[in-house]
Image (cartoon, grey):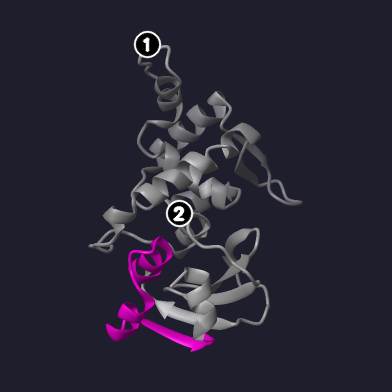
């Protein structure tokens, strides 16, 4: 890796994670350990040889490691404890990006699993939950759930829990609600969202 030649924490951090794709690889692994083919699927646009190079560099730097997946012999990649500490700066960047997201995808790729990192980052910063609630989310692809408790927010696959409400909307709408940049009443008036179940729960979860 090329260095900046500066005795500065930011410069040395960027020497490891500042190259193109590196933080997006970390994003995928913050969602969960992943095999090589899963990383290819979750990083649309990356070349296979470039991904291999980036994984090798991040492993050499101590950000990630290889491990056996389950009981089989397949290898998956996972963050080391030090690498997992990147969650906080990445969540800060997600919150900082809110003005950049309001214009919608504009043809860019989107994967619903990316919301697993984005929604807690946005909601934890501005919403305090008084009672636990579970909201189903349908934003394209497989449906998943947003679990809200007093300790924070968690997004994951449906686990059989009953939903207090279900939200159907496009990603820009859901991100706008989570960031506090879009009012629920405006989203309803514009036909951007459908809600089944308790609307009051949706308002509480999204601070709307």
Q: Which residues are magenta?
A: 172-198
* 146 relative to 151 in the view: left or right: left
The correct choice, above or below, for 55 with respect to 91 in the image is above
Q: Locate the N terminus and report the quarter of the image it occupies.
A: top left
Q: Nearer the viewer, mark 2 or mark 1?
A: 1
In-front residue for pair 72/31: 31
Q: CA distance from mark 2 to mark 1?
A: 33 Å
Q: Position of residue 25 (x, y in %)?
A: 47, 43
Within-10-Å neighbours for mark 2: few <14, some 14–19, many 20+: many
Q: Which mark is residue 5?
A: 1
Badge 1 element: loop
In-front residue for pair 115/99: 99
Q: Which mark is residue 39?
A: none
Q: Residue at x 46, y 36 (%)?
A: 52
Residue 36 visible in image: no
- Figure quadrant of residue 7: top left
Q: Which mark is residue 42?
A: 2
In-front residue for pair 175/159: 175
Q: Residue at x 63, y 35 (%)?
A: 80
Q: Residue at x 45, y 50 (%)?
A: 40
Q: Position of residue 51 (x, y in %)?
A: 43, 39
On whether residue 162 falls in the magenta region, the answer is no
In-front residue for pair 101/73: 101
Q: Position of residue 117 (x, y in %)?
A: 50, 55
On whether residue 187 falls in the magenta region, the answer is yes
Residue 169 visible in image: yes
Within-10-Å neighbours for mark 1: few <14, some 14–19, many 20+: few
The correct choice, above or below, for 9 with respect to 158 in the image is above
Q: Position of residue 77 (x, y in %)?
A: 59, 42
């Amino acid at each position: 890796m090329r260095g900046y030649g500066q005795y500065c924490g930011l410069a040395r951090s960027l020497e490891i994670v500042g190259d193109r794709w590196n933080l997006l690889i970390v994003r995928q692994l913050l969602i969960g350990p992943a095999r090589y083919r899963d990383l290819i699927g979750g990083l649309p646009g990356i070349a296979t040889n470039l991904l291999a190079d980036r994984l090798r560099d991040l492993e050499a730097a101590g950000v990630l490691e290889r491990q056996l997946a389950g009981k089989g012999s397949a290898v998956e990649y996972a963050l080391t404890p030090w690498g997992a500490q990147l969650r906080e700066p990445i969540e800060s960047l997600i919150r900082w990006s809110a003005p950049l997201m309001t214009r919608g995808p504009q043809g860019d790729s989107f994967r619903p699993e990316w919301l697993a990192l984005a929604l807690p980052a946005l909601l934890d910063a501005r919403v305090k939950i008084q009672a636990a609630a579970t909201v189903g989310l349908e934003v394209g692809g497989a449906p998943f759930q947003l679990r809200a408790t007093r300790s924070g927010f968690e997004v994951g696959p449906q686990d059989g829990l009953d939903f207090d409400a279900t939200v159907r909307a496009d990603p820009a709408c859901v991100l706008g609600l989570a960031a506090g940049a879009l009012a629920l009443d405006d989203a309803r008036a514009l036909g951007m969202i459908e809600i089944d179940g308790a609307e009051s729960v949706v308002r509480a979860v999204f601070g709307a």
